[in-house]
Image (tube, grey):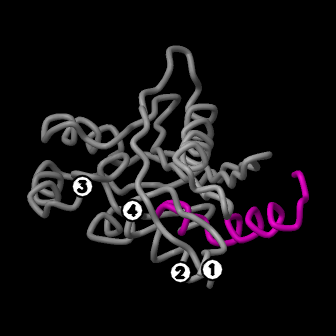
Amino acid sequence: MTPTLYLASASPRRRELLTQLGYSFSQFSVDADESQLPGETPLVYVERLARLKATSGISMGYQDAPVLGSDTIVVLGQQALGKPKDKNDFMVMMQALSGKTHQVMTAIAVAGTERILSRTVITDVTFKPLSEQEIEQYWQSGEPQDKAGGYGIQGLGGRFVTQLSGSYFAVVGLPLYETDELIKAFMAGVDE
């Protein structure tokens, strides 16, 4: 049976969230260059990556159903913080986020062979002041290594969050309401 949708992401978190929406889907991984282009703003960058992942799925032959691509970045000021390269990179990120409000931008894109729709959801997240010991212990947990901005709000990293304004699910990696609305609009042939 052909799925209603394809998810162009290997993320188990995105799989769980898309499952909550009740769609029949197949998941695959996309190997895309996720480097930020010179002069590219975080907003343009995250949306370009989501669109790239969705259209890459079409190019890979997933053409019998729409392809959903998504990307999440953590932004402090105008700087996008990716996944930490190593422990030192992680320590610098956490010290920069400590006691401050940052933005989490999650872009979603739905593509077919003829068209693509996309949307970006921005959530403000505030961290408590972090001690060096808390940062070190968090690194040792193993959780931060594959997370944008070096933390997972749905895991141990959630204990650092004092305030959130926007979509919790977007911070996890897939905004439920906006994703559902975008898929419905795409399926109905509506251009946003």
Please name the amino acid that badge 4 sits on: Ser
* Label 4–label 2 contact, CB within 8 A: no
Type of secondary structure dominating the magenta stretch: helix
Which quarter of the rendering shows the N terminus?
bottom right
From the viewer's perspective, tell me whether residue 65 is left or right of residue 151. Answer: right
Decide: is 156 above or below 53: below
* Label 1–label 2 contact, CB within 8 A: yes
The magenta-colored residue range is 169-192
- Which of discs 1 and 3 lies nearer the camera? The answer is 1
Residue at the image point whose x is 46% and y is 29% from the top: 79
Which residue occupies the foreground of this view, 29 or 63? 63
* Label 1–label 4 contact, CB within 8 A: no
Residue 136 is situated, as x and y percent measured from the top left of the image, at 11, 52
- SS label for mark 1: loop
- The answer to which of marks 4 and 2 sits earlier in the sequence is 4
Residue at the image point whose x is 58% and y is 56% from the top: 62
Which residue occupies the foreground of this view, 187 or 105? 187
The residues bearing labels 1 and 3 have C-alpha atoms spaced at a distance of: 29 Å
Say the numbered circle drawn on residue 23.
1
Say the numbered circle drawn on residue 19.
2
Residue at the image point whose x is 36% and y is 44% from the top: 97
Say the numbered circle drawn on residue 11.
4
Label 4 packing within 10 angstroms: few (<14), some (14-19), many (20+): some
Please name the amino acid that badge 1 sits on: Tyr
From the viewer's perspective, tell me whether residue 77 is left or right of residue 99. Answer: right
- Which of discs 2 and 3 lies nearer the camera? The answer is 2
- The answer to which of marks 1 and 3 sits earlier in the sequence is 1
From the viewer's perspective, tell me whether residue 5 is left or right of residue 102. Answer: right
- Which of discs 4 and 3 lies nearer the camera? The answer is 4
The residue beneath circle 3 is 144
Residue 21 is situated, as x and y percent measured from the top left of the image, at 62, 80
